[in-house]
Image: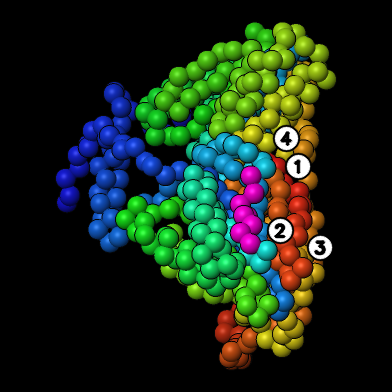
Amino acid sequence: MLNISTKTPTGGFSFENTRRNAVLEANLSEKGYSAPNARKTGTTIAGLIFKDGVILGADTRATDDMVVADKNCMKIHYISLSETFFTLPGVAADADVTTQMMSSNVELHSLSTGRPPLVAMVTRQLKQMLFRYQGHIGSSLIVGGVDVNGPQLYSIYPHGSYDKLPFLTMGSGAASAISVFEDRYKPNMELEEAKQLVRDAITAGIFCDLGSGSNVDLCVITDKTVDYLRGYDQPVQKGMRGGTYRYKPGTTAVLTKTVTPLPLDVVDESVQVMDTE
Amino acid sequence: MKEYHYTGPVEHKFSPYAFNGGTVLAVAGEDFALVASDTRLSEGYSIHSRDSPKCYKLTDTTVIGCSGFHGDCLTLTKIIEARLKMYKHSNNKNMTSGAIAAMLSTILYGRRFFPYYVYNIIGGLDEEGRGAVYSFDPVGSYQRDTYKAGGSASAMLQPLLDNQIGFKNMENVEQVPLSLEKAVQLVKDVFISAAERDVYTGDALKICIITKEGVREEIVPLRKD
């Protein structure tokens, strides 16, 4: 039987946890605390369709409010083994769980139907799940891949809407990246030209958007191959520090030191034979 | 159990302030002072300018660094410059660093109930030619320091300065007074590190070096992403 990891509710929307969350929030604020916020990645992601397939690109900065939490995180995630789909989590850590769920669902669905999976199938499952959660799962994604219907590119928003387009951008740096695409995109581009265009779009996001930065990751998907080019380009060099900031042993003050020897006696010895036939 | 109710659409008032980012740092030495700032001006997730330094030269012996809301920074520096001219014309001498600091405190407190959203740090030479740093909060509370960081990356820089200049949390270390070359190198290094992790800090670093010869400037590029 096709078993999706979360139980699909019998009818309507499931908001069982909202009352519980409200109570938790109220209890916390009574004591003067606030509930933790989800960390948004603030990102530039982009995808386009070229002559032989799809190219997806992403920056590699993850931010915690306005501090960089991860300078080289992976935003391009792998969905399916037999066919080649990749999604790009746009703006939240929900993306990790989402892609893991989709990965298993795609496999199960294609085993159940006996056919190789379709990009449209992944998109539909994702949008149905996101709509069910009414936008509380804050991931925007780009899904790209090649299946029997050719190369396809979809974008999905947190509330569950989707678009099917030849080129797309998402994240806080979407505006910077889409301007590059609008200027230079042509249908049926060659591979090298297309890679350069995606790289330039992500680079625009890296420099012009504060939420994006560090390196460009690319993923080239054709009907025959998948090329995951992690760190395809590094448009920003880390500054070199001039001084040395090493500390000699003995610099940190030791206030107290207690040594407690632990004498151990053998109390019981038993041997369990493993069946290695 | 508390009642859960949906509050409905919320109206947002117009806010007279904006946050334009930027980090400022000042260090006082034996016979010099440094005031450094990055040159990025941002708002939200965008960059307005990559070349908007936050240090303003007031006299030959005093430089002020202002970060926070850029509109208030500009107005405040205009007011300070006007007051400096008035003082010069009535007293026939330039204001000393300590006098400028005291005056700035009264200017800021004058707007106690609609503050200038500016974090100020003054760096300069005092009457004896020794380095002086004065740090302020938005409503005028100030004190003289040896070193101080202000602005968006201040929480990242201040602990490092406490360790390297103040020799805090260290034992068995020779406490040599800071030379000008070491101070400049330290300032460059801390800003390079701040640019790695703070999104508001980057593009370029401008260091104003104040000695008895006057005010010298050095510009160093930083990460642009």
Q: Are marks 2 and 1 on the same chain?
A: no
* Kind of residue at badge 3: Gly
Determine the residue positioned at 78% across, 23% down: A196
User: Alpha-carbon neighbours of circle 1 within 10 Å: few (<14), some, or many (≥20)?
Assistant: some
Q: Secondary structure at mark 4?
A: strand
Residue position marked by numbered label 1 in the rendering: A236
The chain identifier of the residue carrying mark 4 reads A
Residue position marked by numbered label 3 in the rendering: A242
The stretch in magenta equals B52-59
User: Alpha-carbon neighbours of circle 3 within 10 Å: few (<14), some, or many (≥20)?
Assistant: few
| Colour scheme | rainbow
Does the image show residue B31? yes
* Kind of residue at badge 2: Ile
Q: Is residue B21 magenta?
A: no
Distance of mark 1 from mark 3, alpha carbons? 19 Å
Q: Are marks 1 and 3 on the same chain?
A: yes
* Kind of residue at badge 1: Val
Spot occupied by residue B129 in the image (x, y as percentages of width and height)? 68, 77
Residue position marked by numbered label 2 in the rendering: B207
Q: Are marks 1 and 4 in contact (CB under 8 Å)?
A: no
Q: Are marks 1 and 3 in contact (CB under 8 Å)?
A: no
